Image: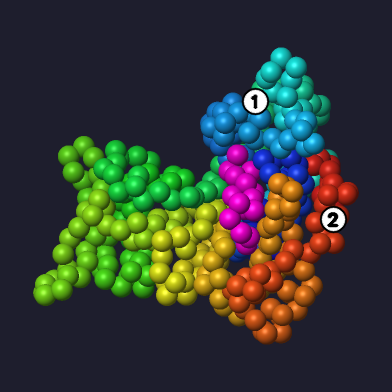
Amino acid sequence: MSHTTFIKRVILRNYKSIGSCDVHLRPLTYLVGQNGAGKSNFLDAMHFVRDALTGSLDNAINERGGLNEVRRRSSGHPTHFGIRLEFCLRDGREGWYAFDIGAMASGGYEVQHEECVISGIGKGPFFRTAKGQLHDSSETAFPAVTSDRLALVAASGFTAFRPVFDALTAMGFYNLNPKLMRELQKPQDGRLLKPVGENISSVIGHLERVASDRVKTIKEYLQSIVPMVHGVERKAIGPMETLEFRQDMAGAKHPWKFLAQNMSDGTLRALGVLTALLQSNVDYSPTLIGIEEPETALHPAASAALRDVLTQSSNHTQVLVTSHSPDLLDDHNIDADSILAVISEGGETKIAPLDEASRKMLHDHLFSAGELLRMNQLEPDRKITDQQHETQTDLFGEARP
């Protein structure tokens, strides 16, 4: 397993449009499917874990419209939902973190079960809870557990569980918003780019101070994607801050300077994607980066440069990308194992590796993944989707193949 693969496996139950899902992830994984297929819901399940740990479970649910918007309705009846993430920590130890959440008759919700295990039950640190009660743990002392909060938040005060908490909360998920990136921003924590890029000026400023080589790389990639842009840097304006770009102008001897408010959506999104992917530095390093449709608003000619930065970034940080762009996938070097096909049938999202026919065409270099996508031939393995539906893998207990 590559040292950059933090999340090895994701198992979901009844999360939004996803009834059941059990997939393995690579250092770089493409989730490919049509608009509305449910790609974003897969990323959001992992984002939900991060939000529930960094803020609160209540906020994570409410930010998504409440429990009824988070859990999938099956045959008209509400159901509980569950998430299991199998991970590999940077020190090489493997384990899993899982929980399921159900509605209460009073209208609230409760954490029905929660489990965090490192190196296997009885082999390393672990705890298991059920409905607000500690079931068992490797630790002789354990903080109070309540049914409306995730126990890992309190358990992170123990040295044994802190690495899992830190790794899960160091995941970053992005659906960049040029409008917010364009506005003047208050100085913020610049260690990790926020989900829509609303603190990008602070992130660029932070990198300028602690990792100037990263800023140089961002600028180089930005120029390869937007050739007229020759640089970008943080600029203070009174108590606020923004970004200042240098751009070629016809007839001018030197590049002109423009503030972010004057830049195009495509340029700002490109900078946001590059910053998200290249923000690792000696001060802070994300464990996983998930990006929604990084090709949006970019010229198709920029796809090769975008693929290159995705590949290079995955050597240092695990990367997940949602896309329905044939141009982004138009490369014979994209491995079939790095693609998960996402489809929607009857309102239910199904996610699986490519079927045998698609895999063979990619392996034999008959077509690129982009060419297959244009022909609507990137199909999930139906045996796997049927198996996921019929024999749902347990969220809890020892990992199985």
Q: Is residue 173 left or right of residue 248?
A: right
Residue extending farthest top: 106
**Mark 1 in CB contact with mark 2 (< 8 angstroms):** no
Residue visible at 71% across and 84% down in the picture = 364
Image height of 214 relative to 287, above or below: below
Residue behind mark 2: 386
Image height of 146 relative to 100, above or below: above
Q: Is residue 163 visible?
A: no
Q: Give percent across and percent down for residue 128.
A: 78, 32
Residue visible at 48% across and 60% down in the picture = 294
**Which colour scheme appears in the figure?**
rainbow
Residue 149, which numbered label?
A: 1
Q: Is residue 88 left or right of residue 120?
A: left
Of helix, strand and loop, which one carries label 1? loop
Disc 2 residue type?
Answer: Asp
Q: Is residue 131 magenta?
A: no
Q: Is residue 368 visible?
A: yes
Between 69 and 345, the one nearer to me in the picture: 345
Residue visible at 68% across and 44% down in the picture = 17
Of helix, strand and loop, which one carries label 2? helix
Disc 1 residue type?
Answer: Arg
Q: Which residues are magenta?
A: 32-48
Q: CA distance from mark 1 to mark 2?
A: 34 Å
Q: Give percent across and percent down for residue 120.
A: 80, 46
Image height of 42 relative to 31, above or below: above
Residue visible at 57% across and 34% down in the picture = 64
